[in-house]
Amino acid sequence: MNRSLVWGIALLMLLGAAVLAGRASQAPAPAKPAPPALVDAELARCRTASQDDLACRAAWAAAWDRFFGQPAS
């Protein structure tokens, strides 16, 4: 009974170390492309701009990324 208890504890320790090592290897979330204040100011300007304005398209794409957390496609 003593041996099985020691092996069980050793197995739990190895399993815990493997779980912690797996969490440490995960990459951090990517940084946001622009601060929200800059994006919001640009979107306010784009409300009256034409649809062909490339800066407005970029601002809308950044707002999309910020809202949904993924690149617009």
Image: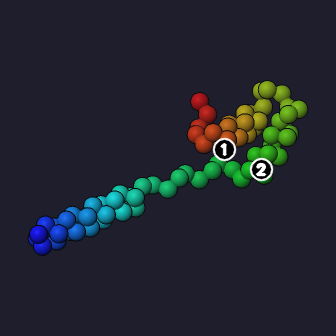
Q: Secondary structure at mark 2?
A: helix
Q: What residue is at 30 percent from the left and 65 percent from the top?
A: 17
- Tell me which amino acid carries mark 1: Arg
* Residue 4, numbered circle: none
Q: How many marks?
A: 2
| Residue 58 seen anywhere in this rendered image of the structure | no
Q: Could you say where residue 47 lies in the image, as x and y percent from the top left?
A: 85, 34
Q: Is residue 49 above or below residue 66?
A: above
Q: CA distance from mark 1 to mark 2?
A: 12 Å
Q: Is residue 45 above or below residue 50?
A: below
- Tell me which amino acid carries mark 2: Leu
Q: On the image, which quarter does residue 42 sit in?
A: top right
Q: Tell me the residue that label 1 is attached to.
A: 66
Along the viewing direction, whichever of 37 and 51 lies nearer the viewer:
37
Horizontal side of residue 61 vs 17, given as left or right: right
Q: Tell me the residue that label 2 is attached to.
A: 38
